[in-house]
Amino acid sequence: MYIYQIEVSNHCSLTCSYCPHPFQARPKGLMTFATFRKCVELFKNHCDNVATLRLHNFGEVTLHPELPEFIRYARAEGVRCSFFTNGMRSRTQPHTERYWRELADAGLETVDFSAHVMSTSEFRATTGNRVVIGRVYDPGAVVPGSWAGQVGPAETPVPEPCIFQRMSALVVLWDGRISSCCLDVEGQFEGLHVDDLLAGRRYRFTPIPLCSTCSSMRHEEAL
C-alpha cells in the first residue's frame, strides 16, 4: 500500500476551465487535525521509503487555516510535507511573504507551483525565497489533459497499469475516506476510511468506472 497523497482541503481559490474541480459535486470540507494525525501515522507505517507526504488533491492546500500546525506536527513526527499550490488566498490576492515565512518556520521546505495566475518569478518573490520551488505546472505552456474524460474527450485506455494499480496506491480525502485515484474529482471509493487501514484492514486497488476512460499516470513514480 502506498499513500499517494492526502487532501487536506477540497476548497479552491480559483475556477480553472481545464480542471474538473468547478464541477465537483461531493461536499467541500477541511481535514481535521485528528484525521491528519491518523494520516501521518499511516504514512509512517507504510511509506518509510517515500521522501515526502503530499498534501494536495482537489483544492488549494493553503486555504486550510491549520496548515502551519499540520506541517509542524508532521515534521515533529519525522515526516516532510510538500504540496502543489497556486499561491492564491483568493481569486485576486496572493498569500503574503509573512504567510510563507510561517509555513517555512513550521518545517515546510519545498512546494510545487501551478502558474495559473502568477508567474514562477512572481511567486518566488511573493514567498521571499522562504521555500524551494520544485515542479512547475504552467497551463499556458502545455496542452491540458482531459482528466480521463472529466473535462474533455475520453482517453483511450492502455494495457499498462497506472501507479495506483501497480503500487496499490490511494488518496485520503479530507474527511478520511479512501479514494482509488488522484484524478477522480468525486473521490470514488470502496467504503474504506483511514481508521480501517490503521486497524489493519487490507487495501487493494480495484478499478473504478473512470479507469475505462483513462490512459494517465502510467509512468508516475513514488516521490
Image (tube, helix red, strand yellow):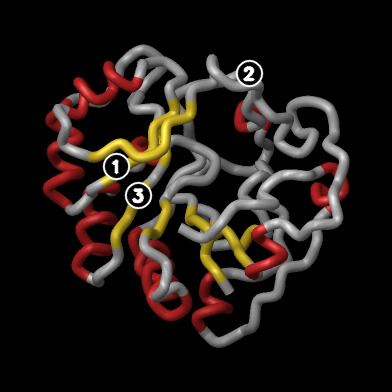
Q: Give percent across and percent down for residue 122.
A: 27, 17
Q: Residue at x 21, y 39 (%)?
A: 131
Q: Give percent across and percent down for residue 112.
A: 38, 38
Local packing at callout 2 (Cα closer than 10 Å; few below 14, some 14-19, many 20+) is: few
Judged left or right of residue 47, residue 133 is left
Which comes sooner in the sequence, label 2 or label 3? 2
Tag 2–tag 3 contact (CB < 8 Å) = no
Which residue is the site of mark 2? 17
Q: Is residue 29 above or below residue 117?
A: below
Which mark is drawn over residue 82?
Answer: 3
Instruction: Name the residue nearer the viewer: 189 or 81.
Output: 81
Q: Give percent across and percent down for residue 20.
A: 66, 31
- Find the distance from the CA under tag 2 to the CA under tag 3: 25 Å
Give amino acid for label 3. Ser
Which comes sooner in the sequence, label 1 or label 3? 1
Look at discs 2 and 3 and give the one toward the viewer: 3
Q: Is residue 78 above or below residue 220?
A: below
Instruction: Name the residue nearer the viewer: 52 or 192.
Output: 52
- Find the distance from the CA under tag 1 to the CA under tag 2: 26 Å
Q: Give percent across and percent down for residue 51.
A: 37, 63
Quadrant of the rendered image containing residue 38: bottom left
Give amino acid for label 2. Ser
Q: Residue at x 66, y 61 (%)?
A: 164
Which comes sooner in the sequence, label 1 or label 2? 2
Q: Residue furthest bottom?
A: 200
Q: Is residue 106 above or below residue 129?
A: below
Which residue is the site of mark 1? 65
Local packing at callout 3 (Cα closer than 10 Å; few below 14, some 14-19, many 20+) is: many
Q: Residue at x 29, y 42 (%)?
A: 65
Q: Is residue 129 above or below residue 125?
A: below
Query: Split into 4 quadrants, where in the image is the C terminus?
Result: bottom left
